């Protein structure tokens, strides 16, 4: 009691003291010259501090109450929004149920007393009311139970197989066409049954038609539970979900073409782009799901990769019908460089330290880039699992995709996909053992070469095909002022931009002038010039594609000590060079025709086709030289395997052609590098054929060996002939190798005798064998080379070149060989026998072939004269 009294007195005194202090500070505030200073002094009193705390507490409570009310209002708005969304989702099903009840219950009950329905009254309303209600309740309960079971089954699928994926992928389970239809049917059955029961409370008589309809629906739902339920097991495979996003993607891209109703509406273009990107994102999630380390099934990867190929191919084909400025293509910042000269952009960047904002440009490769990333993910996973058969399947599909890209002028996408394929496939081939599953690795190399040819061949074919008709049709489309007609034919994107700009100009001209004043010939020139620029770029691109897609991977495989796989790619590379030359010649003619249209009185058109042809020839020679480098490796790896292709024989034949070319071009360096490889390949093939051919079949065995020896001696004879004409010294390297070959033989005399036997009996070799036909080709090259060297064609191709004994313009060796109608009397291998073999120490005491003696006599006669 005493303590409480003391506390009350203390608080009273403190309050009185506070009031005195506050009054004192208040008087100072009044006397102060600054009101702010006086207010500050008042707030420093105890009463001011207490009042400030109370005010802050009241303010906090007010703000907290206001925040709670705002949160409750937000929750209410969210709930109202959710209710609206739910109503939008269930309204169609509710409408169907209400319509069913109106048509099958209310209308019969309303019209059953009218004349036309009186005869059906007993039938419509004859159903027992109790049984009617019981059946409807039972149907509603059974439908709800089946619906719950079905959702449970789908939840199991989503919670096991698709536990780690995004919700958009799990939603595909419900969006499956079978599941979606079955769920809607169950919901409709349950809702309609409940409405039917509810109407009986309003004294609506039972309807036999309605109960029959409900029994039909309930029977369909119950009997369909097993087959529809079994379809759910299919959804355990992620690849089974791919058709749904693909279908949506294709639908969205079709709306952006000239057949779409809102294809030029920017807002709709953005909407379609977003929808398509969502589907691609779902495919990316599915790819990540099937390529996980704990997902062991390769067939799912194959199926999903083929689905992605379908998406990329469909987009590349349809994309040519979409305007270049469409918002379907995402916008990205354009890459800019600093200009070395003085410019405003450079000055701003140096002064402010920031680059000017670049104008956004359309990214036409965005979908293809994402698809390529998914495809490479699938390929890398199969490579890591060493599933070579599945890798070959994917490479074949990817090769067809590269071809599809090339046919619609998507060179960037085609080359991008090809580069990724080369990177991964060459890595596999470089690490493979030569004799470990060689057929599978050969297949991989061949499929890679098949894909590499597509960007070289197909764009040029499409550009050269019916170009005149295409230009005329495009001119008519532009003059019709119908923008949709521009996109009915696939044009390169560069040409399409020109056509779109020119169409806008023509439309503006028509709106201002009231008529088109532009002449058709001017439109034709613009279109022809646009295509000419594309063709010129394609001509320049062909050598680049050959080097990038074939020469560089082959060089990498050679460095990795993989000669067998490199040889397969070399064969494809030589094929690409031949086809590339054909396409360049074709495009040169097309380019000249287009330039004559666009510039009828201009200078001669220059397509740089000759430069491209020279570059391709260099690549061709480079491939042959690379092949010659791996001949020793081929002799050790390819020889002896009967089930492998004869890459060494093909290499030998191509090296032989390159040797003749080197002789004709006086290229001693190339001849010196290639001839040892040709000699080594000939000896290896000879030994292998002798091992394989049955000794009892002596005639066939001898003819095959003689064919090989005649090839080698023909090349050596050509080296002697060209060295005598050009003084190039090519024979020197061949001379050294032949000397070593004779010295290292067990019996040099027998070796030389075998060569003489081949020279003396050339008819034992089949006339139309591949080697015989190749030797004829070499002789034709010799004749053409002699004419280019200034030797008159009449003396070479005349009927009787020896009738005139006047001054001669041909070398003695060529004169001694004797030509009749372009064909030499003395073959090059006979020249080799006369000028080299007959002069060897091992040839002493041996009888020379008749043709060799005849040639020696002619040479001695010429020297005597």
Image: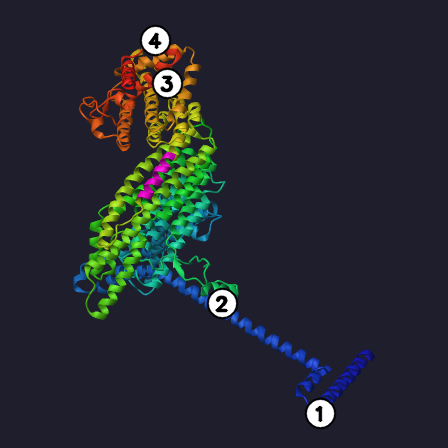
Q: Which stretch is magenta?
A: 610-621
> Does residue 522 appear in the picture of this structure?
yes
Camera-nearest label, 4 or 2: 4
Question: x and y percent of residue 365 in the render?
Answer: 38, 52
Judged from the image, the secondary structure of the residue bearing numbered disc 4 is: loop
Question: Contact, CB < 8 Å: mark 3 with mark 4?
Answer: no
* Quarter-of-image position of residue 487: bottom left
Disc number at residue 686? 3
Residue topped by disc 2: 75
The reply to whether the magenta stretch includes residue 616 is yes
- Left or right of 527 on screen, residue 689: right
Report how far apart the C-alphas of labels 1 and 4 lie in the structure.
145 Å
Q: Earlier in the sequence, mark 3 or mark 4?
A: 3
Q: Residue furthest left?
A: 115
In the image, residue 463 above or below residue 617: below
Q: Mark 4 packing: few (<14 Cα in 10 Å), some, or many (20+)?
A: few
Q: Earlier in the sequence, mark 3 or mark 2?
A: 2
Q: Quadrant of the N terminus?
A: bottom right
For the residues marked 4 and 2, what is the alpha-carbon distance in whole angstroms?
A: 113 Å
- Tell which tag, 1 or 4, sits nearer the viewer: 4
Is 815 situated left or right of 81 in this image? left
CA separation in Å, label 2 and label 1: 55 Å
Circle 1 residue: 31
Q: Was residue 391 drawn as part of the magenta stretch in this picture? A: no
Indicate which disc residue 85 carries. Answer: none
Q: Position of residue 252 (x, y in %)?
A: 33, 55
- Residue 846 numbered tag: 4
């Amino acid at each position: 009691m005493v303590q409480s009294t003391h506390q009350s007195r203390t608080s009273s005194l403190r309050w009185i003291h506070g009031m005195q202090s506050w009054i004192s500070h208040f008087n100072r505030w009044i006397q102060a010259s600054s009101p702010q200073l006086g207010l500050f002094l008042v707030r420093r009193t105890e009463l001011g501090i207490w009042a400030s705390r109370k005010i802050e507490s009241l303010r906090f409570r007010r703000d907290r109450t206001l925040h709670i009310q705002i949160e409750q209002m937000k929750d209410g708005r969210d709930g109202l929004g959710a209710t609206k969304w739910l109503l939008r989702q269930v309204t169609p099903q509710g409408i169907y149920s209400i319509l069913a009840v109106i048509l099958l219950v209310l209308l019969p009950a309303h019209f059953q007393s009218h004349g036309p329905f009186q005869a059906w009254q007993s039938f419509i309303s004859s159903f027992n009311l109790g049984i009617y209600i019981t059946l409807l309740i039972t149907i509603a309960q059974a439908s709800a139970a089946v619906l719950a079971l079905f959702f449970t089954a789908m939840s199991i699928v989503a919670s096991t197989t698709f536990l780690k994926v995004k919700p958009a992928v799990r939603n595909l389970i419900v969006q499956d066409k079978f599941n979606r239809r079955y769920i809607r049917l169950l919901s409709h059955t349950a809702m309609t049954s409940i409405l039917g029961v509810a109407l009986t409370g309003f004294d609506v008589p039972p309807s036999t038609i309605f109960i029959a309809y409900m029994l039909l629906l309930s029977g369909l739902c119950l009997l369909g539970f097993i087959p529809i339920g079994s379809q759910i097991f299919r959804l355990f495979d992620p690849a089974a979900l791919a058709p749904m996003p693909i279908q949506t993607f294709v639908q969205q891209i079709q709306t952006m073409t000239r057949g779409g109703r809102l294809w030029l509406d920017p807002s709709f273009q953005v909407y379609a782009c977003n929808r398509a990107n969502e589907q691609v994102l779902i495919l990316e999630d599915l790819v990540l799901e099937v390529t996980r380390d704990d997902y062991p099934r390769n067939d799912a990867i194959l199926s999903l990769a083929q689905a992605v190929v379908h998406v990329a191919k469909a987009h590349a084909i349809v994309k040519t019908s979409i305007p270049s400025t469409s918002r379907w293509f995402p916008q990205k910042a354009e890459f800019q460089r600093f200009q070395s000269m003085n410019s405003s952009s450079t000055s701003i960047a140096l002064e402010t330290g920031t680059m000017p904002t670049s104008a956004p440009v359309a990214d036409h490769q965005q979908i293809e880039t994402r698809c390529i990333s998914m495809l490479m993910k699938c390929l890398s996973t199969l490579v890591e699992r060493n599933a070579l058969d599945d890798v070959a399947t994917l490479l074949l599909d990817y090769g067809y995709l590269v071809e599809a890209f090339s046919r619609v002028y998507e060179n960037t996408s085609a080359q991008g996909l090809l580069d990724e394929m080369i990177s991964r496939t060459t890595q596999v081939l470089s690490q493979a053992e030569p004799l470990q599953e060689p057929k599978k690795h050969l297949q991989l190399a061949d499929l890679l070469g098949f894909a590499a040819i597509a960007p070289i061949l197909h764009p040029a074919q499409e550009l050269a095909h019916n170009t005149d008709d295409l230009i005329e049709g495009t001119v008519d489309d532009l003059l019709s002022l119908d923008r949709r007609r521009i996109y009915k034919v696939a044009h390169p994107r560069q040409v399409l931009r020109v056509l779109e700009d020119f169409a806008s100009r023509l439309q503006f001209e028509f709106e201002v002038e009231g008529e088109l004043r532009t002449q058709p010939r001017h439109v034709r020139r613009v279109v022809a010039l646009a295509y000419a620029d594309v063709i010129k770029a394609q001509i320049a691109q062909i050598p680049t594609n050959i080097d990038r897609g074939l020469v560089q991977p082959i060089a990498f495989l050679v460095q990795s000590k993989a000669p067998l796989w490199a040889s397969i790619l070399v064969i494809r590379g030589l094929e690409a060079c031949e086809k590339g030359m054909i396409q360049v010649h074709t495009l040169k003619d097309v380019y000249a025709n287009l330039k004559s249209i666009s510039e009828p009185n201009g200078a001669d058109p220059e397509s740089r086709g000759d430069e491209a042809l020279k570059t391709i020839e260099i690549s061709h020679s480079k491939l042959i030289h690379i092949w010659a480098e791996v001949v020793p490796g081929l002799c050790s790896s390819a020889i002896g395997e009967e089930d492998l292709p004869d890459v060494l024989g093909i290499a030998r034949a191509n090296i032989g052609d390159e040797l003749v070319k080197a002789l004709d071009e006086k290229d001693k360096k190339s001849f010196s590098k290639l001839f040892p490889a040709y000699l080594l390949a000939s000896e290896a093939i000879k030994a292998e054929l002798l091992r394989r051919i049955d000794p009892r079949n002596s005639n066939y065995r001898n003819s095959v060996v003689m064919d090989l020896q005649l090839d080698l001696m023909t090349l050596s004879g050509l080296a002697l002939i060209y060295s005598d004409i050009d003084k190039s010294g090519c024979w020197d390297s061949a001379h050294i190798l032949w000397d070593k070959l004779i010295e290292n033989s067990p019996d040099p005399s027998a070796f030389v005798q075998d060569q003489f036997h081949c020279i003396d009996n050339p008819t034992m070799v089949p006339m139309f064998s591949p080697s015989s036909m190749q030797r004829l080709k070499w002789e034709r090259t010799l004749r053409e080379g002699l004419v280019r060297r200034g030797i008159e064609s009449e003396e070479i191709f005349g009927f009787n070149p020896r009738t005139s004994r006047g001054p001669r313009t041909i070398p003695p060796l060529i004169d001694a060989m004797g030509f009749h109608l372009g064909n030499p009397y003395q073959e090059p291998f006979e020249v080799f026998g006369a000028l080299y073999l007959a002069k060897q120490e091992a040839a002493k005491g041996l009888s020379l072939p008749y043709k060799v003696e005849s040639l020696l006599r002619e040479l001695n006669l010429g020297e005597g004269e």
